[in-house]
Image: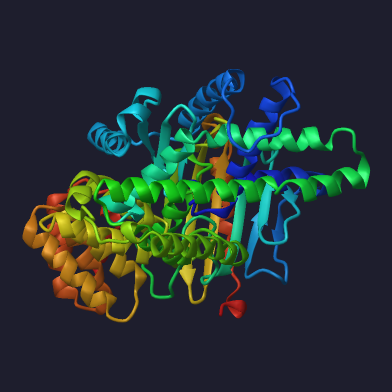
Amino acid sequence: MRKLLILCMLCIAACATTNQATLYEPSSRNFSVVIPEGWEKVNMEKYLLITKYGPFSHYILVQDYGIDRKFNHTNKKFKKSMLPLEASEVIIDEISTDEQIKNFRLIENMPVTINTYDGFRLIFTYNTADGIGHKTMYYGFVIGDMFYSIRYNACNEAYYQKDVATFQEVLNSFRVLQARVM
Amino acid sequence: MGRLGAKETKRRIRCGIAALFIFSLLACVPARSVHFTKVEMGCEEEERLLLQRSEAEQRLIEEQRSVYEDEQLEHYLTELARSLQPPEVLARISFRVTVLRDRSADALSFPDGRIYLTTGMVAQLENEAQLAILLTHEMTHCTHRHALRALRHVKEGAVRRKGLSGAASALSWQNALPSLETYLDELESEADTVALQLVVRAGYDGAEGGKLLEWQQRDLEEGDLDEVSRVTRYRELEKRKEFWHKLLDTRAEDAKPGITGREAFLAHTHRVILDTACADEARGRFTLAQREVERYLAIRPDDARAYCLLGEICRQRGLVGDRNKAKDCYTKAIDLRPSFPEPHRGIGLVYYKEGEKARAKNSFEAYLIFAPDAPDKAYIQRYLSTCN
């Protein structure tokens, strides 16, 4: 998380503001998503990060990566045959074992359908080492050899509530590009 | 022991802290042109500063790292440490052992006799003999004033360099004194030598020191270190192991078999072992976690939680044979405590993935009976709906 915020800070100068909703569908990614009007895309190679008020206040992060990817804090890995419940537990372990994350509290872990795929939704809160509280809504699912995640993070409840509806729009616009599914 | 950290990065940070600690003291202590290798009498000022700084460091450690709350365990460790020292040492230093909640295996001591062990370190030990070796090693850092001697070593180097400049100074420093790291290694060897004498005198098996170092090498495989750090750490442990075996070879009286005290050790440390196994399972260090649970089960063979945890380890690891082993463990946990919800869930998930829908249904239903407000209730209900 901390690393992510530092990267955000470094890349903030490279932000591209969208005056109207735009479709994000780069050839390097396995997904497409609509970036809402007024949100800025922070240029990141490995994932899509968008924000309206700056990544320290809130952001939406969309990722796709191979299931064999090594996590930073747990040695657990996704498996093709994993049930959504099992995949959600890998993510919970990855976040809760991060030593920079304090007071991790899981509020909800629910099965959901994301763009026709069975997945999970986590809602959790935590504090970073500097004491700042965060709230995250995290959607994820495994298809074939790939894991997809779409998460919304805000530094406090007020910011969280402010754009949670916009996040749902982004989530609804999320599409896996079938042609590239491995 | 002094530098038995499982994480190379943490070890380096510790070395950095030690160096900072020493250099910050240098800034406080008036320099005198002294040349000695043994600690002189009359260095009260340096010791006073060391003790002051120790207290500050300990406050920082306890603020930043969570203390493992277990009074009985702390009492056991402290009493064991004290029992290994002669009365004249105890009259001078009041040893106290505190356990920190930290998965990495680490131990450190302060000049005032305060010793910190991490939960990861305690869980890595096999018996009381190994614990005694670890404690005596750490206590030797206090009794033999290693912090003060390291400080003096740095100061002496600084004094020798004074008056020389540039390359001459650097060469002089290199040639005149071993580096701080080499000197610290010498102190570690001294701590091992004294530790062996003390534990053998107390009746423990000195050979356990070599085994402890071997366990640590083995546990590196599932640690957090990158490849280069792991190899470096492995070699360091190998060097220490060789030194330990050499000690045993050259001191025939210390090589006699002694007690290991496995039962006494496990009786006092079983809780921390199971907690560490849980932490290792969450981190996906399945081999370590399995070893810890099995050690726990050796002393508490009727604990349903431990069998359930072993089931979770096998289910998630997913190696050949793990699925059946997971089912056996969950079944054993259910036999021991039928109303314990988690093993019903675990075995239900295994059956569900095997396509054994009727068995999965029974297990999921049992799970929801015993845990009607389970946080994953919605998933289980969804899976149940496909079992009909």
Q: Does B355 appear above or below A166?
A: below
Indicate how the structure is coloured in the image: rainbow
**Point 53% across, 23% down: residue:** B51
Pick the front one: A103 or A82: A103
Q: Nearer the viewer, residue B14 or A60?
A: B14
Q: Quadrant of the C terminus of chain A?
A: bottom right
Residue A24 found in image quarter: bottom right
Q: Residue at x 38, y 70 (%)?
A: A82
Relative to residue B13, is residue B360 depicted above or below? Answer: below
Question: Which residue does the image show at 29% across and 69% down from the upper left?
Answer: B314
Closest to the observer: A89 or B357? A89
Q: Is residue B366 left or right of residue B291?
A: left
B186 or B230, nearer to the observer:
B186
In the picture provided, is A104 more to the left or to the right than A18? left
Locate residue A129 relative to residue A141 in the image: left or right.
right
Coordinates of residue B52 in the picture (x, y in percent): 55, 20
Question: In x, y percent, where is residue B334?
Answer: 11, 61
Place of residue B96 in the rendered image (x, y in percent of width and height, measured from the top left): 36, 30
Count of marks overlaid on the render: 0
Q: Residue at x 29, y 38 (%)?
A: B77
In x, y percent, where is residue A173? 59, 58
Q: Is residue B142 above or below residue B381?
A: above
Q: Is residue B72 visible?
A: yes
- Residue A112 in sight: no
